[in-house]
Amino acid sequence: MRKIYAVVTGATIGAVLGYVTDQMLTSYVLQNAEEAMVILMTNALSAFLMIPLLIILFSYLSYRMMKKRS
């Protein structure tokens, strides 16, 4: 049961971090890029690659930490 909590906590942390990073990246791109294609590419990249990778990474790390503790 504790492992499930660890994985859920890690996934939540990863999702929040990914969302915040995505928002920061989008605002930066909107300020500096003039081509709409660049904006679309960075949004797609962060939405489909960065956020799931962060979720998986933090889930795995929290699972390993919980495993090490017990």
Image: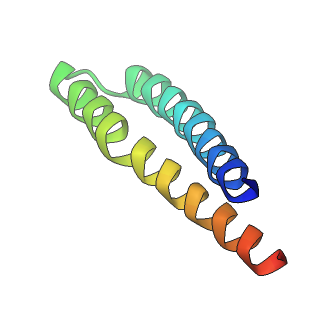
Where the C terminus falls, by quadrant?
bottom right
Q: Is residue 19 above or below residue 51?
A: above
Question: How many marks overall?
Answer: 0
In percent of width and height, residue 57 lies at 52, 60
x and y, in percent, of residue 5 in the image: 72, 48
Q: Is residue 25 above or below residue 59?
A: above
Q: Please say if 10 is above or below 30.
A: below
Task: Please state the horizontal and vertical placement of residue 49, each as a whole percent of the image.
Answer: 32, 47
Q: Nearer the viewer, residue 29 or 22?
A: 22
Query: Residue at 60% of width from left, 57% of height from top?
Result: 58
Q: Nearer the viewer, residue 68 or 26?
A: 68
Write down the quadrant of residue 41 in the picture: top left
Q: Nearer the viewer, residue 32 or 57?
A: 57
Q: Identify which residue, 25 or 32, lies in the foreground.
A: 25
Where on the picture, by quarter, is residue 37?
top left
Residue found at x 58% / y 45%: 11
Residue at x 72%, y 53% (from the top left corner):
1
Q: Position of residue 48 (x, y in %)?
A: 30, 39
